[in-house]
Image (cartoon, grey):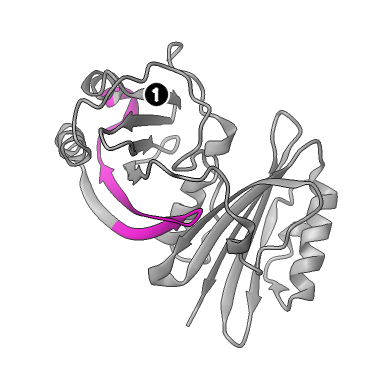
Amino acid sequence: MNAIPALHKSFRPLALAVALLAVPCGLHADVFSIWPFGGGASGKTVGSDLSAESAEDTLATLLDATQFWSEKVTVNGRNMTMKISMSDQSLPTVRASVLKLFPTAQVAGNETSLLMRRPLDDGSSQRIFLLQLRGLNPLLQFTTVLPKDMPRECPMELWPVEFPVVSGADGFMLMKFPNRDSHFGTYEIANSEIAPVMDDLVAKIGNAGWAPATMEHADLFEGAGDVFMKKDPDALLLLGIVRDAAGAVQVSFYTRKLK
């Protein structure tokens, strides 16, 4: 793995969004490591060697993977499709074969994940993300094709009113799931601390009529977010907050109507 650069911090939120959609709403989800369009990985990037469809089919054969989820999504105002497949293979076992299969892809990864970016002939790019939680099966494969005019940040006019903004927030990213009327968004606050950001957000969320369901946010030592509920109409909001090694606080939101 020494030859593969570590995943850039801007990749963190995607798998959380997927986890929140793929499991029952009450299950607590950890924050993993990918936005479908994040930059930051270094490595060789040459032309495309396979079409997006051919790459998916070839990888599915290699991994003996089965697709179990596909949905139209909107990321920062651009429409695309996200697909998720599962495999009984282990990432350490297939890593070398996957890298050999896509020799021209830009690659980043760590011991539990592998991200590949493949430029396509029409100017779009295919992102393939393999994720295996420590000690657990299956191996998950996330695949999407991003348009060539993909915005790196969400236009603020698209930002949901349910997601409060704190002072110093930057790097807004938004994923919308039209079929389930839900949103996932994230931003960061440079050179900040979790406690004041948490207090500010919880107050703003409470003032908007949401009630905390767990009081996890009140834990001075372990608090990293909370689950909030709202009536008329019934809705769910999840808040996640972490602080990275550079001192930036990463804030993630997920909301979904329950009826």
Q: How crowded is mark 1: few (under 14 residues within 10 Å), some or many (20 or more)?
A: many
Disc 1 residue type (three-letter): Val
Residue under the point 78% across and 55% down? 166
Residue under the point 47% across and 61% down? 176
> From what the image shows, is residue 15 above or below residue 108?
below
Q: Is residue 194 left or right of residue 254?
A: right
User: In the image, is residue 102 part of the stretch drawn in magenta?
Assistant: no
* Closer to us: 214 or 62: 62
User: In the image, is residue 87 part of the stretch drawn in magenta?
Assistant: yes
Residue under the point 62% across and 62% down? 157
The image position of residue 184, as x and y in percent, is 54, 58
Q: Main secondary structure of the magenta part?
A: strand
Q: What element carries label 1?
A: strand
Residue matched to label 1: 107
The image quarter containing residue 101 is top left
Instruction: Specify whether residue 219 is in view.
Output: no
* Closer to us: 36 or 49: 49
Q: Is residue 104 left or right of residue 78?
A: left
The image quarter containing residue 231 is bottom right
* Closer to us: 231 or 35: 35
Range drawn in magenta: 70-94
The image position of residue 74, as x and y in percent, is 43, 58
